C-alpha cells in the first residue's frame, strides 16, 4: 500500500515538480525499495529518450534562413512619410524588446535543460542497483580511477571531521560532455557532485551560486577550468558545506 502511494508521485518526482517535503522521503524510500527504484529509473530513461527524440526534429539553421528570406521577400504597401517617421522608432523598440525577451527565454531554457539533465542523472544514480563504478570512501582510490576515462583531473577534499562520507564515483555525460559523477552521503542522504570541463557551452550560461531547481538544492561554480555541480535533496546548508569542502580542495 505504501509503495502504491509513492508510485503515484514518481512522475512528479522525476519531472522535478514534487514538493521538497515529499521529495526527501521518496528518495529515502527508493533506497530501500527495489521496485520503486526500478520504476523511477524507467521513468527517467523514458524522459531522456523522449527528449533526445524531440531534438531530431528541430529546424535547421538553413530552414530558418529560408523562412526569413521568404518573409522578407513579400512586397510591402507604401506608407506616407509621416507614418514612416513615427513607425521606425516604434519598430526599433519592438525589435529590441523581442530580442531581449528571446535572449532571456533562450538562456532560461538552457538553464532548465542543464538542471533537468543533472536531476535525471542524480535520480538515476539513486534508483540504480549500482550507483557507482568505483566503490570507495578513500579519495586516493577514487581520484586515480578516473585517469584515462575523462579528459581532466580534479582534487577531492579531506572529509575527516565533517559529516560527509564519500561512497564512490562513475563516469557520466552532460550534453554529450564526459565528466565525473561522485556520490557523497550525509545522514543517509545521497548527494551528487558532478565535475565537467568549463568549455563555454550551455553550462557556462548558469550563474554561479546556490539555487533550488527541479525539487533539489543545487550549487555550481567554476574553478581551475572546471565546472562543479552539487545536487541533492538535503538542506541548502548541507549543499553549501560540501561545496565549501570541494572548493578548498581546488
Image (spheres, helix red, strand yellow):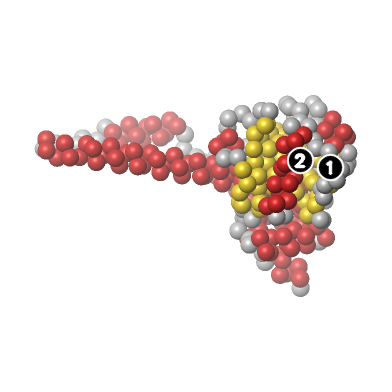
* Viewer-closest of 60 and 88: 88
Kindly indicate the quadrant of the structure image that contains residue 36: bottom right
How crowded is the residue under tag 1: few (<14 C-alpha within 10 Å), some, or many (20+)? some
Left or right side of 108 for 95:
left
Name which residue lies at 65% across and 34% down: 222
Residue 229 place in picture, x, y as percent: 68, 41
* Viewer-closest of 95 and 165: 165
Name which residue lies at 80% across and 40% down: 169
- Callout 2: SS: helix
Residue 145 place in picture, x, y as percent: 84, 32
Q: Earlier in the sequence, mark 1 or mark 2?
A: 1
Residue 148 place in picture, x, y as percent: 79, 26
- Residue 159's disc is 1
- Which part of the image, by quadrant, shows the C terminus? top right
> Is residue 197 at least partly visible in the picture?
no
Residue 35 place in picture, x, y as percent: 79, 61
- In this rendering, the answer to whether 32 lies above or below 185 is below
Residue placed under numbered mark 2 in the picture: 245
Left or right side of 57 for 156:
right
Q: Are marks 1 and 2 in contact (CB under 8 Å)?
A: yes
How crowded is the residue under tag 2: few (<14 C-alpha within 10 Å), some, or many (20+)? some
Left or right side of 166 for 50:
left
> Is residue 74 at least partly visible in the picture?
yes
Name which residue lies at 78% across and 45% down: 183
* Viewer-closest of 222 and 96: 222
Amino acid at each position: 500500500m505504501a509503495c502504491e502511494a509513492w508510485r503515484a508521485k514518481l512522475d512528479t518526482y522525476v519531472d522535478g515538480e514534487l514538493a521538497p517535503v515529499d521529495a526527501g522521503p521518496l528518495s529515502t524510500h527508493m533506497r530501500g525499495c527495489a521496485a520503486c527504484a526500478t520504476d523511477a529509473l524507467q521513468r527517467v530513461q523514458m524522459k531522456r529518450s523522449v527528449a533526445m527524440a524531440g531534438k531530431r526534429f528541430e529546424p535547421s539553421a538553413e530552414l530558418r534562413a529560408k523562412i526569413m528570406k521568404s518573409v522578407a521577400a513579400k512586397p510591402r504597401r507604401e506608407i506616407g512619410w509621416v507614418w514612416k517617421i513615427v513607425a521606425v522608432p516604434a519598430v526599433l523598440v519592438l525589435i529590441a524588446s523581442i530580442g531581449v525577451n528571446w535572449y532571456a527565454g533562450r538562456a532560461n531554457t538552457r538553464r532548465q535543460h542543464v538542471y533537468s539533465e543533472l536531476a535525471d542523472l542524480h535520480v538515476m544514480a539513486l534508483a540504480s542497483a549500482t550507483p557507482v563504478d568505483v566503490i570507495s570512501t578513500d579519495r586516493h582510490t577514487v581520484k586515480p580511477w578516473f585517469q584515462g576515462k575523462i579528459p581532466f583531473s580534479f582534487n577531492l577534499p579531506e572529509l575527516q571531521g565533517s559529516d560527509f562520507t564519500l561512497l564512490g564515483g562513475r563516469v557520466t555525460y552532460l550534453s554529450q560532455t564526459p565528466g565525473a559523477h561522485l556520490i557523497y552521503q550525509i545522514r543517509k542522504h545521497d548527494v551528487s557532485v558532478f565535475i565537467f570541463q568549463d568549455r563555454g557551452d550551455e553550462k557556462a550560461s548558469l550563474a554561479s551560486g546556490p539555487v533550488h531547481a527541479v525539487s533539489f538544492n543545487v550549487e555550481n561554480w567554476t574553478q581551475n577550468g572546471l565546472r562543479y555541480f552539487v545536487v541533492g535533496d538535503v538542506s541548502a546548508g548541507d549543499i553549501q558545506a560540501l561545496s565549501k569542502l570541494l572548493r578548498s580542495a581546488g
